[in-house]
Image (tube, coloured by chain):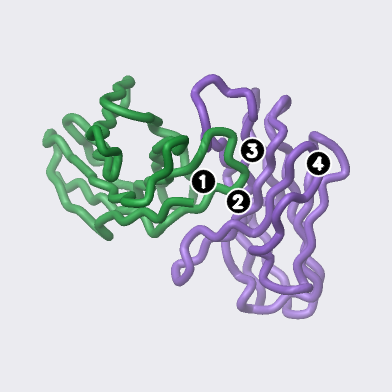
Amino acid sequence: LAKTTQPISMDSYEGQEVNITCSHNNIATNDYITWYQQFPSQGPRFIIQGYKTKVTNEVASLFIPADRKSSTLSLPRVSLSDTAVYYCLVGPNNAGKSTFGDGTTLTVKP
Amino acid sequence: DAGVIQSPRHEVTEMGQEVTLRCKPISGHDYLFWYRQTMMRGLELLIYFNNNVPIDDSGMPEDRFSAKMPNASFSTLKIQPSEPRDSAVYFCASRSRGESSGANVLTFGAGSRLTVL
């Protein structure tokens, strides 16, 4: 499984765009990149997944460069309710094991 | 679908007692995972099942921990005897092999917060 590296914490203000980058230098050809969000006292929740280039849904965008050795989760116009821990996972399709790293604690301030 | 259902949500017990945590995965999901979360160690994968069969239990900390999945709609994680260091939030998650969105899309339950005194 590819090892991932994320910043431990980030601060932002309401209304700003937040970009969280995850490094995964040893990503394999068949690996997907998946991001989860976890609020206090809740289980992680799926946000977005991608393989290459750009993926966008109603919550976030995921940017993946051509070499796929990193990825960036972009949250547009964050609000206080986006304060959470964000995890980046890398693994092959139909993977059994799903291992979470330390995640990035995002704090959104008023 | 009601999602992944875990019980109990909170459990307080004394050292040495047996603890049983329960999980009902999403219907049709054929992978089930048990995680433990603490401040010190983060989210740790304890064990996972595929089609009710345990595939990898290398994360189970010691023999005091055991997990079963007698059928596709139910799993238990048991700690016997429990110790204070087992205090944590235990999450169950499930996933479908056939999801068109690809790999690693887990759905988590709300968790069971265990406190061992």
Which residue shows up at 24% across the image and 33% down it?
A66
Q: CA distance from mark 1 to mark 3?
A: 12 Å
Image location of residue B46, percent across then percent down = 64, 59
Image colour for chain A is: green
Tell me the mark number nearer the camera, choosing from 3 and 4. Answer: 4
Q: Which mark is residue A78?
A: none
Residue, disc 2: B91
Tell me the mark number nearer the camera, choosing from 4 and 2. Answer: 4
Q: Are marks 3 and 4 in contact (CB under 8 Å)?
A: no
Indicate the chain on which mark 1 is placed: A
The residue carrying pointer 1 sits among few (fewer than 14), some (14 to 19) or many (20 or more) residues within 10 Å by Cα, namely many
Task: Indicate whether B84 appears above or below B106.
Answer: below
Indicate the chain on which mark 2 is placed: B
The residue carrying pointer 4 sits among few (fewer than 14), some (14 to 19) or many (20 or more) residues within 10 Å by Cα, namely some
Q: Which mark is residue B94?
A: 3
Q: Are marks 1 and 2 in contact (CB under 8 Å)?
A: yes
Task: Please report whichever mark, 4 or 2, sits nearer to the chain's N-terminal start.
Answer: 4
Q: CA distance from mark 1 to mark 2?
A: 7 Å
Image colour for chain B is: purple
Q: Are marks 1 and 3 in contact (CB under 8 Å)?
A: no
Q: In this rendering, do the residues under marks 4 and 2 share a single chain?
A: yes
Residue, disc 4: B52
Looking at the rendered structure, the secondary structure element under dot 2 is: strand
Q: Quadrant of residue A64?
A: top left
Q: In this rendering, do the residues under marks 3 and 4 share a single chain?
A: yes
Q: Quadrant of residue A49?
A: top left
Tell me the mark number nearer the camera, choosing from 1 and 3. Answer: 3
- Residue A81 appears in view: no
Q: Which mark is residue A43?
A: 1
Q: CA distance from mark 3 to mark 2?
A: 10 Å
